[in-house]
Image (spheres, grey):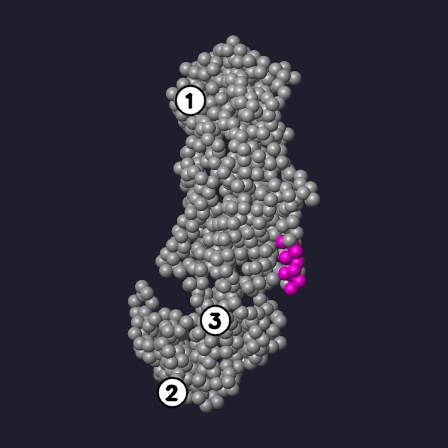
Amino acid sequence: MRGLLLASVLALGCRPADRPATPPSAHRIVSLAPSSTELLFALGAGDQVVGRTTWCRYPPAALQVPDVGDGLNPNIEAIAARQPDLVVLYRSPLNETAATQLGRLGIPAVTLAQDRLEDIARAARELGRLTGREAAGDSIGAVMEALLGTPAPAPIARVAFVVWDNPPMVIGGGSYLDQLATLAGGANVFHDLGAASATVSIETIVARNPDLILVLSDSTAPPAYSTRREWRAVRAVREGRFITLPADLFGRPSPTAPAAVAALRRALEGATRR
Amino acid sequence: MSRWIGLGALVAVALVSAVALGPAHVALGDLASSEIVRSLRVPRALLALLVGGSLGVAGASLQALVRNPLADPFLLGLSGGAGLGAVLAIALHVAGPWALPLAAFAGALGAMALVYRLGLVGGAQLDPRVLLLAGVAVGAFSGAITTAIVSLAEAADLRNAFLWLWGGLSGASWDTVLVMAVYIPVPLVVLYAAARPLDLLALGEEPATHLGADVEPLKRRVYIAASLLTAAAVAVSGVIGFVGLIVPHITRLVWGHRHRALLPAAFLGGGALLLFADTAARVVVAPRELPVGIVTALVGVPLFAVLLRRWAGVRS
Amino acid sequence: MSGTAPLLAVHGVTYRYPHTAGDALHDVTLEVKAGEFHAVLGPNGSGKTTLVRVALGLVAPGAGTAELAGRPAAAWSRRDLARVVGVVTQREDSLFPQQVRETVLLGRYPHLSLWGAERPADRAAVTRALERCDAVALADRWIWTLSGGEYQRVRLARALAQEPRLLVLDEPTASLDVRHEMELFELVRGLVDRHGLAVVMITHHVNLAARFADHVLLLADGRTAAQGAPGAVLTRETVERVFAWPVAIEPFDGRPQMIPLRQPKEPT
């Protein structure tokens, strides 16, 4: 199965006849997604990154790289001004169009899926190949695959990720966060939702009764909605049982996933002890 | 009389189904004791009734005021103002659980004042066409500023602010219900008192004046009261479209054009529609939830088409 | 019927629309008492509608006074005034479809209390108004199904439902054929004779005004060209001067009738 996936990724990585071929070893890379920026630095290719999006903040060294816009609707001119020999895009229909536009300007572009942890493994290998650092790429890929390959521990807590309060949005089984939780021993009560995120009613959260609410935040304060009357129907909110997850480890699927899993495991153990 | 009994029964059924049905399974016998029902479903059902009712009455009044049956409470720029207010509150990190609704309300009032002022430009005296154009302009302008702020800003939170604006009753609690219940009676009473003069206004401003209506103060009162109702609705539940547009038409098909009957019917009808729509939004793709504005369109438009066919048959 | 205070009295009124040069009205005087039928005539733009606006207190005159039933026009609240004066405007666009009885009922507005419902007395007033306008048969019809003449009768009925003492009609026969025009003039004359109403009618129909009205006010360029009994006002000199067209005046039924003459073309 994995072989088939790898083959199809490579096949998809092959550009159609009208797109320029990627250079044997890219030296001026514009990376338009936080995951790929982080991966490039992790591969030791940070010096070769000449453009990033506003959202690419990890590692801190990435902040020195010039910003070419928010990357959601790629600014072709700003990208071209950096004179890249490779552009790395997050895989989405809009970005396929951007890749084609870049191709017309003679700039090679690849789109990489970057949603789940296995995508990071593949992306690491692909970027390793593109930057002439196959060994580093394979190494990161192996670490990710090992992480994914270890059997998940028995769950020690039932959790829900609440990313927005009005309307209430939770993380489902399609997200890397769900994977991190499973690996850390947290059972996502919304795992059955196939999407990465979904809007639900508060009453659904009440009914599924998670032990802990996981919040993506760099501050440790409980979220603003925790004082609202309707949210206090959720037991975990009433009892103040929140775990805040800082952006550096949890903000995107990342090669630091093993550290994230460990941190989350510690937090879950600490919370369930009380 | 039987029409009113029918409408009352419809509202009762809507309330009961909103309380009994939901993505979380609550057995009928447990309804009274269930925390979900008491803390979440009952206030949400009441809020749907109050918001839907407010939108229905505001829509009917504004359609009479601007003499345009296609007028919707959000046509006068209020939703744009509310969105801008909400986005500014998030961007400026204003704290507190009521920050967002209050900021949205303030934004909506700002838009209302601006449109009102534009409606008076050049002695226009709240000319309906000027009001509509000003409303569209103010709405578009605030929308543009809002989009600019969101695209330039760095917090992911701001993008999620748009989700709130799309409308939903997730923020319903006994607190919100209380605030709405205390707030809306005054604008509702003002509009009901204006019911007969609004009938006169339908003939035109000059004939209405000669029949005894004080047209300029009337337009001001109706505009402000309808805007206040709409601003409150947006503040607690974002922009829920179609209710204010369609409910007056549906109720006109049954109750006619006399506003003394139409306004109360629009209140109850709007409340019932939003109740059914919200119940459907919560249940149809459970455990996920649909934005209620989509459901109001999906439910309201075919309903309107059916009634329109019947009315067209009567006319021919 | 005369000897009481005039229902409508404007004295020496002058009015100029904002941002215009020239007075729309200059030093015009008109008194209307109960049981009198006044016609206001004049070419387009001579100030007829402006006169009505000033008389009803919709705009304040730059000079002169306007009084209604003995009180200054500006002192009347719109609601109180609607109980005394019924106005049928030139045009009306009804936004929503209505039945005749419903639209006539709107005329009861000035008599209804803020919260109270319509009373049997109101419905009786509507029926009476419909009877006086010979429109009872139309009571349950929808407005859009009415002919022009029928619609005008209904609008008149609505004004009568207000139970006014003065009726003001602005070109009520503008688009009516001869039969409906005659019917309307007869109707109005009957209201004056049998029910003692006062009527001010703006009309282009010089001849019918001459036949039916008691008094005629002929305006030209905002000024009074002539005023008084039709026979005194509608002389050839005056009419030709005001309308800038050659006419002959022939008597009919004791009233002057205007016959416009053809302008011979210059031979080429």
Label 1 near label 2: C-beta < 8 Å? no
Magenta residue span: B1-11
Magenta residues, dominant SS class: helix
Residue behind mark 2: C232
- 10 Å neighbourhood of mark 3: few (<14), some, or many (≥20)? many
Comparing marks 3 and 2, which lies closer to the viewer? 3
Going by the numbered disc 3, the residue's amino acid type is: Leu
Q: Are marks 1 and 3 on the same chain?
A: no
The chain holding disc 2 is C
Comparing marks 1 and 3, which lies closer to the viewer? 3
Farthest-out residue, front: A274
Going by the numbered disc 1, the residue's amino acid type is: Gly
Residue behind mark 1: A51
Above or below, A199 against B112 in this view is above
Q: How many marks?
A: 3
The chain holding disc 1 is A
Image location of residue B25, percent across then percent down: 67, 39
Residue behind mark 3: B211
Q: Nearer the viewer, residue C184 or C95?
A: C95
Going by the numbered disc 2, the residue's amino acid type is: Ala
Comparing marks 2 and 1, which lies closer to the viewer? 1
Helix, strand or loop status at disc 2: helix
- 10 Å neighbourhood of mark 1: few (<14), some, or many (≥20)? many
Helix, strand or loop status at disc 1: strand
Who's the residue at 51% across and 62% down the image?
B192
Image location of residue A135, percent across then percent down: 52, 9
Q: Is residue A230 highlighted in magenta?
A: no
Q: Nearer the viewer, residue B135 or A189?
A: A189
CA gap, disc 2 to disc 1? 96 Å
Q: Are marks 3 and 2 on the same chain?
A: no
Who's the residue at 52% across and 29% down the image?
A242
